[in-house]
Image (cartoon, coloured by chain):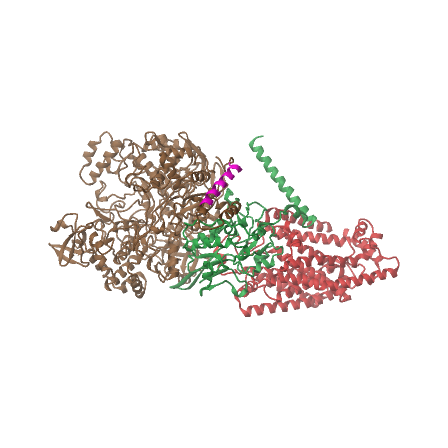
Chain colours: A brown, B green, C red
């Protein structure tokens, strides 16, 4: 591997300085300042002393220390990443950001902001415990004994299977991937996929299906249940913080090449219910279907006057401390902004708030309902906005959105069901709804931009013998079921505080909003909490208004599939692509009632038609083989044993070769889950690889970040099909595809003669999609000669395994190269922050309809309890999957929180940040509780719960420890609540000793400090080993566990 | 010679070197202080001295860089100040506590920028909780070096290795510093820490390269190696002088996610810091000691 | 016995030098010090030895300047102790430097505002002065030894006498003695302020530190001097009691010393009481907290056992109880007790100041093992300290053996012949 280029001579250096100086001079002369010539001469000398200010030492890329995906400026000295700062081109990291067309040489001396995690990123990449070679276990799973084997051998073993662990006394026959990837015909796959949809809709019987595919039934997991899909589904890819670009790459492999539907990510551990609730609440009705929707509308912090933050740790987590902090602090000191925070814990943002509402955990929606009641009673909602029932009415009022407030919902058997359609009462078509206005029932097409229709907000009537209520009427009835005093009792707040916040919220017109993300929704009632808080926003009609609720500015379509005329629709450029079909192992996106496994209620395990991947279901489902067993798992960048509440209870499944015959991990270290694997393939970190980042949540302009290698990879370089590549997830997938002869990879991966043999063959096309824009003329300029030279110079330290200009060029059409360089030289493509607004409105609009009522939810049933869901916000106690209320089972409610320096499991490497800012986490208690328990700062306590009565953490192979931590006594926490931050208490990830090739590698105890509380989280009594979960969005419950503390 | 042999040889050699060094030092001890010093540490300390010489100002930022926002304004003001002779600058920091979100980004950014080892921290952020539930607040206080107008630390230095330079920055000449740590005891703000020669990866399988790469403090390169300054020296915040002379704001200023830290030339009446200093919310730490810090807080 | 004694000292010295080698190679990371607790055992020993030196010297001035004839016999011990203690102090400050190889800079660069820099110059002058005085009081004996000595002592004395030879006539010798006495007195007079300066100045190093309210107190330099006097008197008492052999009126001399010791301890206690009572009463947190640490906290044991017990109560009792005050052995032990006790005094003068964060919450703001307000000396610190002390004792013992110290010509006596005989017998005694 080539280190800092030894051929980089003094002459090169001079040439470079000349070039840099020259450009700088030109730019400067364009400026208004005098005496440039002499000043510039001076700096040439000065800059020699400060290598971090030299443009040729800078590569812009994208952070991944958390999932916000800030754009960063990596400064490299002597081939070593020396410093990370924010990228001033990006609106995420500088406000206002630098004009996109300024040459990089001119902005080298401008640093953007980036948080402490981002700053500590080099300790993530330069981690002494990074893996460089492939490991194969040399003892039982989790024994901590490994040996290194050549990559080629490892790939051959996992493909061919066999008695892979004979040398350590296991005579088991391990299935190889070749035994799993049975269905190889794209046409058959496509046809089967279409036909099982028919089976679900009862348009085709199983017998008919079997007859049609009698020659191919052997490819199915179970021919009696063809809707489970092909055997290929028995390959599971489970991933965590994978991010865009890599998502598409790995889906290309898992779905398109392997043909498995089981590409499962971890979002139910994060804010999935929030995302899904927002999406549903903002969907449009088109062609008889609910479509679209926006997952993360957020307050326009830069202009808002009042925000109620519910359970979001705005300065510390919440998708972007870097983006949110500045407009908030600025607003707070100049008097523009007032903030109220509802959170059991005094978060940093709460400490700056006008009012802190130390709410009881799990009652966020109730606070919402209480405010809704107060607002409706006092008539402080935006009636004008809410009455608009379609696009035309909204437009007439200068609004960009409207709501379903007046839409009539049918009440059947005492239960609200679907919206009344106009055709049912002879008023119009089946794609029209009905409102009541001026004493008349009117048909309304929500998308009609010509004929304004308005509707009464509170309707409770019978029409043509159909009992009808308006959507807002339903919500009002729910809100009015309890008095404010009762709400205060439930939430543990003062009536006056609730009223004061409601009054403040309704005192700023459209310039107010409710912000929430993960806090309110990680409860079994999370969906309804989300709906209540979303409803508050709609009540003041704030969507799209400056200072109100706005959607993220979004990004340019990097996949090339969403917009027409893009150069590289990579998903479609996949000859021989398999259509993945069947039921995912985690059963999301499919209705239980439509599956051939339907056998009344309760279902054996839950199904999630409205959710994305349900991470916490993965391992319990594998354990029970429901809906089918899994043969091979490839784990990547996700640590279920560490991250999933109660994940420990599934450790037995991982350790059981019968349940998971082949367990492969692709990881940067030996982590808390990869430690139990059969093989670990080294991966590269975000600073050594490609990607396209993630859309920022809190930015109002278009932002497309690009992640690209900034240093030579630390993993070994291997040769795959004649190409030298660093070990990584991509290399592994390319190698497997090559060996197994899978589609979409190799010499003709994209098209005949268009190879996918190197990661950049794929990723550069994504970059080109960004460069070429989303509509004609929306193209970045070509990089000039100077920029091309800078591009080369700044990559002079990269090994040819990563950077070979000729190979990079070959991945693109010739006309795209300079555009791609232009984008890479800036780390992505960024609109200027001043493009965020259009008059009083956002430039990028949510638009469309906002719903208080979700008919599709209201007509679905919980697959376990069989109870119907509610279509609107309701107050529901914390309950299990059978609808049984969880009683008070301990002295404290356990909640978790995030620290600004920590994310899930991967910040324990950050010696500068997490390990020094706070070397261990604490069991945080209110002073009154501490006094009652007789504990003080520094005491140790053990945490026990009903699901873990002894507070024991099983680590496998007979190892166990107690869930014990150090007490920290504070005032800023609601009494009766105990809070523990996540991201500590490691038992792997470099914190423990491991044995590789017979050599003991000592762990670093600093990385294993603190307490890890996941093992005590409350499980669902009806579902073995699964934590309590929210049944609609699929979120796992994090804050519903009662615990008891015992002083140690 | 086989690889293993060569390695052995190399180890032997290094052991021998160590022994020789040990002997040398012992001899040095015996021969009396100074003699050895003449041979090993003779390179005249220029680090600080060169800062006194007005450096040629770097070119200004391109005109099209936004002019109005605080961060750009301060960078422009910085350029303006750099046109003046050193003695006419008076670098000043203003920290708005109400804007500080207590994230410690400045702390870590500074650690990274200056390649600070364990035991050395220039700008920690302190936190205090006030009040009783439910009337509670948390307050955050970043603490850089105060760059006192009357620094108690520079007075005590026996070798004049630390002083307040003409532009108001309290600096240390690493190559002069004998490591007596008197200045550490003398600082009422705990702003001076010592470089013990440790590495964050001590005790792990590998020392990482970023730990030995040079820092750029005081406009020089300081690769990190045993016995070599700044190892075994006192270290402190220097307002990122190396960035200042390159026309860049201190690291804690540019990295701050709450934009709570302001920096500029107090002698320039038009500067943002001058504007902010005329504020009723202004305070300085331990004002009663008469140190007259150049770091102000808005509370 | 003697061989064992030297063997022990040599072993400890070698061990200490090995540790010192490690320390010089590895730098200060071998210590248990932190960036917040930045001075420790070595600085404690540095001021202890400086104090010992100043105390011993001041004791010698009682004889040579203030004409306390009862103590004449211990004059040379006091001067020699002053010399070696000072060297010890300087050695400890030297090894405490992060860059000891740059020590010379402290002589070349003169920051006039720094107390330390004045102190360093003071130390050097003071060494010269002590050497000169020592030479003057011993030149007669050295000259004799150079002429009439036997074995290796003769060439040594030739070198050390710097060519000085006693006059042949008694008249001439008297003249020489008078001249020496005059010079000794002059030097002694010069030396008083210097010794006060040396140690009072060392105390001022701490007292001027506004960052540490525990130190920042004008009584501190005075306490330094008085406790220096305690340690000086105690050292001389101890040495004279145990190592001077049988001398006439030994008990008488020791009793005089004991009286001085009691006086010094009394003043010391008074000052400490004043310091603590005023400090505690005033109640300024940064001042009170270290005092709490001393009286009832982590330094409590050192305070009550060391500072109050060994340095005050025990010597006071031993010097005043009828059963012990008439025994040179017990008085010697009183001296030893006070010496050890003064180490505790030094510990409690320096270290408690580091237990209070300069700003509240600083210790939690950014944490690693070098950013704490806790300190325990490391093995290396202990080994080097023991080694250096052993080295000093070794040198002192050798000097003691080589030079006429105890029954030397104390200016007014003229019995060097007898002394030489005695010297011989003493050496034999030692060899036995």
Q: Is residue B291 visible?
A: yes
Above or below — where is C429 with respect to A627? below
Overall secondary structure of the magenta section? helix
- Residue A455's spot in the image, x, y percent? 18, 56
Q: Quadrant of residue B127?
A: bottom left
Image quarter in which the N terminus of chain B is found: top right
- In the image, taking residue A207 as reference, residue A687 lies left or right, namely right
- Residue B40's spot in the image, x, y percent? 64, 46
Q: Is residue A349 visible?
A: no
- Residue A780's spot in the image, x, y percent? 36, 42
Image quarter in which the C terminus of chain B is found: bottom left
- In the image, taking residue B133 as reference, residue C237 lies left or right, namely right
Q: Nearer the viewer, residue A222 or A88?
A: A88
- Residue B124's spot in the image, x, y percent? 48, 55
Above or below — where is A365 with respect to A495? above
Q: How many marks?
A: 0
Above or below — where is A925 with respect to A262? below
In the rendered image, the residue lying farthest to the right is C169
Q: Nearer the viewer, residue A504 or C369?
A: A504
- In the image, taking residue A392 as reference, residue B72 lies left or right, namely right
Q: Is residue A17 magenta?
A: yes
Magenta segment, which residues? Answer: A8-26
């Amino acid at each position: 591997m080539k280190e800092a280029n030894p051929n980089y001579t003094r002459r090169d250096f001079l040439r470079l300085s000349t070039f840099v100086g020259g450009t700088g001079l030109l730019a400067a002369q364009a400026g208004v300042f005098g005496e440039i010539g002499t000043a510039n001469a001076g700096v040439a000398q000065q800059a020699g002393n400060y290598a971090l200010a030299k443009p040729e030492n800078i590569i812009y890329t994208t952070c991944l220390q958390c999932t916000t995906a800030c754009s960063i400026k990596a400064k490299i000295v002597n081939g070593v990443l020396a410093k990370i700062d924010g990228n001033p081109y990006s609106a995420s990291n500088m406000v206002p950001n630098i004009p996109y067309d300024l040459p990089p040489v001119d902005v080298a001396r401008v640093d953007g902001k980036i948080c402490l995690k981002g700053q500590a990123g080099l300790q993530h990449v330069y981690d002494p415990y990074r893996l460089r070679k492939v490991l194969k276990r040399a003892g039982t799973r989790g024994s901590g004994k490994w040996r290194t084997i050549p990559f080629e051998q490892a790939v051959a073993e996992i493909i061919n299977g066999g008695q892979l662990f004979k040398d350590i006394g296991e005579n088991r026959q391990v299935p190889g991937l070749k035994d799993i990837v049975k269905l190889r015909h794209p046409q058959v796959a496509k046809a089967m996929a279409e036909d099982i949809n028919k089976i679900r809709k009862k348009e085709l019987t199983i017998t008919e299906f079997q007859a049609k595919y009698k020659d191919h039934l052997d490819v199915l997991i179970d021919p009696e249940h063809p809707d489970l899909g092909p055997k290929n589904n028995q390959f599971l890819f489970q991933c965590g913080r994978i991010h865009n670009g890599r998502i598409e790459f790995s889906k290309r492999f898992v779905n398109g090449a392997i043909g498995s539907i089981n590409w499962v990510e971890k979002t139910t551990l994060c804010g999935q219910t929030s995302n899904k609730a927002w999406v549903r609440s903002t969907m449009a009705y088109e062609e008889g279907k609910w479509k679209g929707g926006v997952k993360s509308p957020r307050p326009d912090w830069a202009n808002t006057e009042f925000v109620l933050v519910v359970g979001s740790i705005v300065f510390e987590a919440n998708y972007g401390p870097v983006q949110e902090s500045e407009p908030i602090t600025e607003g707070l000191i100049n008097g523009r902004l007032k903030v109220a925070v509802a959170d059991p814990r005094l978060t940093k943002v709460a400490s700056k708030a006008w009012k802190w509402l130390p709410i009881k955990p799990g009652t966020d929606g109730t606070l919402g309902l209480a405010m809704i009641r107060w607002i409706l009673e006092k008539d402080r909602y935006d009636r004008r906005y809410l009455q608009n029932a379609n696009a035309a009415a909204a437009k007439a009022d200068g609004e960009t959105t409207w709501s379903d407030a007046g839409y009539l919902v049918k009440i059947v058997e005492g239960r609200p069901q679907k919206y009344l359609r106009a055709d049912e009462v002879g008023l119009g078509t089946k794609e029209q709804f009905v409102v009541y206005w001026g004493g008349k029932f009117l048909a309304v097409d929500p998308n009609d931009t010509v004929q304004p229709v308005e509707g009464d907000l509170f309707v409770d009537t019978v029409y043509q013998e159909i009992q009808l209520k308006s959507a807002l009427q339903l919500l009002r009835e729910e809100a009015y079921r309890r008095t404010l005093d009762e709400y205060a009792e439930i939430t543990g707040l003062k009536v006056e505080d609730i009223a004061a916040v409601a009054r403040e919220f309704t005192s700023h017109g459209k310039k107010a909003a409710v912000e929430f993300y993960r806090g309110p929704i990680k409860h079994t009632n999370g969906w309804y909490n989300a709906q209540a808080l979303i409803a508050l926003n709609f009540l003041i009609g704030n969507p799209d208004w400056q200072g109100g609720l706005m959607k993220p500015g979004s990004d340019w379509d990097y996949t090339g599939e969403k917009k027409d005329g893009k150069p590289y629709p990579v998903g479609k450029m996949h000859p021989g692509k398999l259509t993945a079909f069947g039921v995912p192992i985690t059963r999301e996106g499919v209705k239980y009632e439509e599956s051939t496994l339907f056998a009344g209620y309760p279902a054996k395990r839950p199904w999630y038609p409205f959710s994305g991947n349900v991470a916490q279901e993965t391992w319990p489902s594998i354990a029970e083989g429901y809906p089918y067993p899994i043969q091979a798992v490839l784990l990547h960048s996700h640590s279920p044993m560490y991250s999933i509440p109660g994940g420990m209870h599934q450790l037995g499944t991982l350790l059981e070769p019968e349940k998971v015959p082949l367990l492969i991990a692709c990881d940067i270290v030996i982590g808390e889950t990869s430690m139990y694997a059969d093989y670990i393939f080294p991966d590269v970190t975000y600073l050594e690889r490609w990607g396209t980042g993630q859309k920022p949540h809190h930015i109002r302009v278009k932002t497309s970040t690009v992640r690209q290698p900034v240093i030579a990879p630390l993993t070994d370089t291997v040769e795959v099909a004649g190409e030298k590549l660093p070990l990584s997830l991509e290399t592994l997938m390319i190698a497997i595809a090559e060996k197994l002869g899978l589609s979409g990879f190799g010499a003709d991966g994209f098209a005949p003669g268009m190879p996918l043999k190197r990661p950049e063959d794929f990723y550069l096309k994504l970059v080109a999609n960004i460069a070429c824009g989303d509509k004609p003329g929306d193209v970045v300029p070509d990089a000039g000669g100077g920029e091309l030279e800078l591009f080369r110079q700044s990559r002079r330290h990269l090994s040819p395994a990563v950077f070979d200009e000729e190979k990079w060029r070959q991945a693109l059409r010739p006309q795209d190269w300079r555009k791609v360089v232009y984008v890479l030289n800036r780390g992505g493509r960024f609109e200027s922050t001043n493009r965020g607004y259009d008059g009083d409105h956002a430039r990028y609009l949510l638009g469309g309809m906002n719903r208080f009522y979700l008919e599709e939810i209201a007509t679905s049933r919980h697959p376990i309890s069989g109870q119907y869901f509610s279509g609107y916000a309701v107050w529901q106690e914390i309950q299990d999957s059978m609808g049984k209320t969880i009683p008070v089972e301990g002295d404290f409610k356990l909640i978790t929180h995030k620290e600004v320096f920590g994310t899930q499991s991967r910040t324990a490497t950050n010696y500068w940040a997490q390990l020094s800012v706070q070397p261990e986490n604490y069991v945080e208690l209110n002073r009154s509780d501490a006094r009652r328990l007789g504990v003080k700062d520094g005491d140790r306590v053990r945490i026990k719960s009903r699901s873990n009565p002894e507070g024991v953490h099983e680590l496998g192979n007979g190892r166990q420890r107690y869930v014990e931590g150090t007490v920290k006594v504070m005032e800023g926490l609601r009494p009766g609540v105990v809070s523990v931050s996540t991201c500590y208490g490691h038992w792997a990830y470099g914190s423990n000793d491991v044995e590789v090739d017979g050599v003991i590698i000592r762990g670093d105890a600093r990385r294993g400090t603190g307490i890890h509380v996941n093992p005590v989280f409350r499980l669902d009594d009806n579902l073995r080993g699964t934590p309590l979960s929210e049944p609609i969005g699929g979120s796992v419950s994090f804050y519903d566990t009662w615990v008891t503390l015992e002083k140690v | 010679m086989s690889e293993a042999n060569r390695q052995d040889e190399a180890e032997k050699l290094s052991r021998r070197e160590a022994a020789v060094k040990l002997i040398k030092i012992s001899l040095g001890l015996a021969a009396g202080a100074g003699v050895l010093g003449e041979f090993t540490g003779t390179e005249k300390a220029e680090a600080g001295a060169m800062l006194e010489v007005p450096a040629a100002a770097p070119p200004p930022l391109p005109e099209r860089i936004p002019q109005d926002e605080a961060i750009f304004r301060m960078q422009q003001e910085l350029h303006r100040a750099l046109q003046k002779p050193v003695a006419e600058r008076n670098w000043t920091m203003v920290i708005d506590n109400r804007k500080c979100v207590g994230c410690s980004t400045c702390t870590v950014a500074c650690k990274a920028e200056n390649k600070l080892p364990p035991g050395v921290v220039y700008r920690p952020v302190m936190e205090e909780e006030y009040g009783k539930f439910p009337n509670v607040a948390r307050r955050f206080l970043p603490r850089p070096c105060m760059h006192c107008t009357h620094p108690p630390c520079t007075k005590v230095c026996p070798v004049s290795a630390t002083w307040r330079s003409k532009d108001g920055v309290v600096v240390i000449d690493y190559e002069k510093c004998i490591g007596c740590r008197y200045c550490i005891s003398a600082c009422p703000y705990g702003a001076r820490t010592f470089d013990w020669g440790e590495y964050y990866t001590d005790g792990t399988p590998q020392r990482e390269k970023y730990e030995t790469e040079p820092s750029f403090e005081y406009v020089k390169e300081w690769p990190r190696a045993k016995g070599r300054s700044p190892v075994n020296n006192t270290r402190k915040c220097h307002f990122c002088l190396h960035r200042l002379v390159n026309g860049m704001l201190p690291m804690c200023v540019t990295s701050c996610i709450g934009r709570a830290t302001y920096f500029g030339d107090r002698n320039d009446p038009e500067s943002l810091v001058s504007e902010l200093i005329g504020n009723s919310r202004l305070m300085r730490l331990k004002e009663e000691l008469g140190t007259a810090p150049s770091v102000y807080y808005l509370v | 016995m003697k061989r064992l004694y030297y063997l022990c000292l040599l072993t400890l010295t070698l061990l200490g030098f090995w540790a010192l080698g490690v320390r010089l190679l590895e730098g200060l990371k071998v210590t248990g010090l932190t960036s917040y607790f930045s001075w420790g055992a070595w600085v404690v020993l540095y001021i202890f030895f400086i104090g010992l030196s100043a105390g011993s010297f001041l004791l010698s001035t009682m004889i040579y300047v203030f004409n306390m004839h009862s103590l004449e016999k211990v004059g040379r011990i006091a001067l020699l102790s002053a010399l070696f203690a000072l060297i010890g102090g300087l050695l400890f400050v030297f090894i405490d430097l992060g860059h000891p190889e740059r020590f010379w800079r402290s002589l070349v660069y003169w920051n006039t505002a720094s107390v330390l820099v004045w102190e360093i110059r003071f130390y050097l002058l003071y060494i010269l002065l002590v050497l000169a005085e020592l030479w003057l009081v011993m030149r007669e004996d050295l000259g004799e030894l150079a002429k009439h000595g036997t074995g290796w002592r003769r060439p040594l004395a030739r070198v050390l006498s710097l060519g000085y030879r006693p006059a042949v006539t008694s008249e001439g010798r008297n003249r020489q003695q008078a001249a020496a006495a005059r010079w000794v007195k002059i030097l002694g007079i010069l030396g008083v302020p210097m010794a006060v300066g040396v140690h009072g100045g060392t105390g001022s190093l701490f007292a001027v530190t506004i960052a540490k309210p525990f130190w920042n107190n004008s009584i501190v330099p005075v306490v330094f001097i008085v406790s220096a006097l305690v340690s000086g008197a105690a050292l001389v008492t101890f040495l004279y009691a145990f190592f001077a052999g049988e001398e006439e009126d030994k008990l008488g001399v020791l009793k005089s010393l004991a009286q001085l010791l009691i006086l010094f301890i009394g003043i010391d206690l008074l000052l400490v009481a004043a310091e603590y009572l005023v400090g505690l009463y005033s109640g300024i947190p940064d001042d009170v907290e270290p005092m709490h640490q001393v009286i009832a906290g982590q330094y409590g044991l050192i305070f009550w056992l060391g500072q109050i017990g060994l340095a005050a109560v025990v010597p006071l009792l031993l010097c005043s109880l009828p059963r012990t005050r008439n025994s040179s052995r017990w008085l010697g032990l009183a001296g030893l007790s006070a010496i050890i006790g003064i180490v505790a005094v030094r510990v409690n003068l320096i270290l408690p100041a580091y237990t209070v964060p300069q700003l509240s919450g600083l210790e939690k703001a950014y944490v690693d093992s070098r950013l704490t307000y806790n300190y325990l000396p490391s093995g290396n610190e202990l080994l080097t300290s023991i080694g250096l002390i052993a080295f000093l004792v070794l040198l002192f013992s050798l000097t003691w053996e080589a030079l006429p110290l105890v029954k030397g010509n104390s200016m007014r006596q003229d019995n060097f012949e007898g002394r030489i005989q005695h010297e011989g017998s003493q050496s034999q005694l030692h060899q036995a």
